[in-house]
Amino acid sequence: MPNINEAFPSKYLKASDLNGAEPVVAIDRVEFEPVGRDREMKAVLYFKGKDKGLVLNKTNATKIIQLTGSGMTEDWAGFRIKLFGTETQYGGDTVDCIRIKAAAPNGNGTRAAAKPKPQPEWHDEDHSEPVDSDSVPF
């Protein structure tokens, strides 16, 4: 039986695209694009080896700044993050959303605030899963 989400494809990543997985992805770039009915310009985060971008909200952008130590989007390229689905309140309703966390903690689970060194793009910290795994198609 078909999944109803497949009937309404989106150019942008949705929580349902994750299928409950928490993929580790490498940031490729950030582009500013007109999004939604009002065609409002928003930051869209793209990942290496993936087609769909994630429209950034303040919560996710702030988390990436915290993880990378930089508010400059060009400094984010090559940095690995983990995506996960959860819920949030929006307009009085509970809705699905995507959030970001560290791909894998180093030593103390934090990262230096200085400009980050690009991380290897093909494996996570324990070298067990390819970053651009096709197990989560998006």
Image: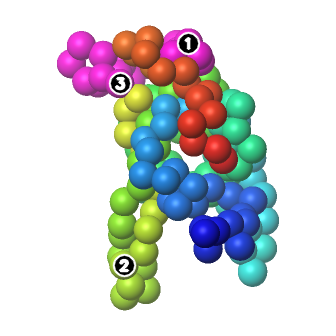
Identify the amino acid type marked 2: Thr
Residue found at the far bottom of this picture: 92
| 8 relative to 104 in the view: left or right | right
Task: Give above or below for 126 relative to 78.
Answer: above
Which sits in the foreground, 77 or 2? 2
Task: Give above or below for 16 relative to 5.
Answer: above
Magenta span: 104-123
| 9 relative to 77 in the view: left or right | right
Q: Which residue is mark 1?
A: 120
Q: Which residue is mark 3?
A: 104
> Which badge, 1 or 3, is on the more N-terminal residue?
3
> Which badge, 3 or 2, is on the more N-terminal residue?
2
Marks 1 and 2, how far apart in space?
36 Å
The majority secondary structure of the magenta stretch comes to loop
Image quadrant occupied by the N terminus? bottom right
Marks 3 and 2, how far apart in space?
28 Å
| 75 relative to 9 in the view: left or right | left
Q: Which residue is mark 2?
A: 94
Residue, x 75% and y 59% (percent of image)?
11
Residue, x 24% and y 13% (percent of image)?
107
Residue 22 appears in the rendering: yes
Which sits in the foreground, 31 or 121? 121
Q: Residues within 10 Å of mark 2 (few under 14, many from 20)?
A: few
| 111 relative to 34 in the view: left or right | left
Are the residues at dot 3 and dot 2 in contact (C-beta closer than 8 Å)? Answer: no
Q: Secondary structure at mark 1?
A: loop
Identify the amino acid type marked 3: Ala
Residue 62 appears in the rendering: no
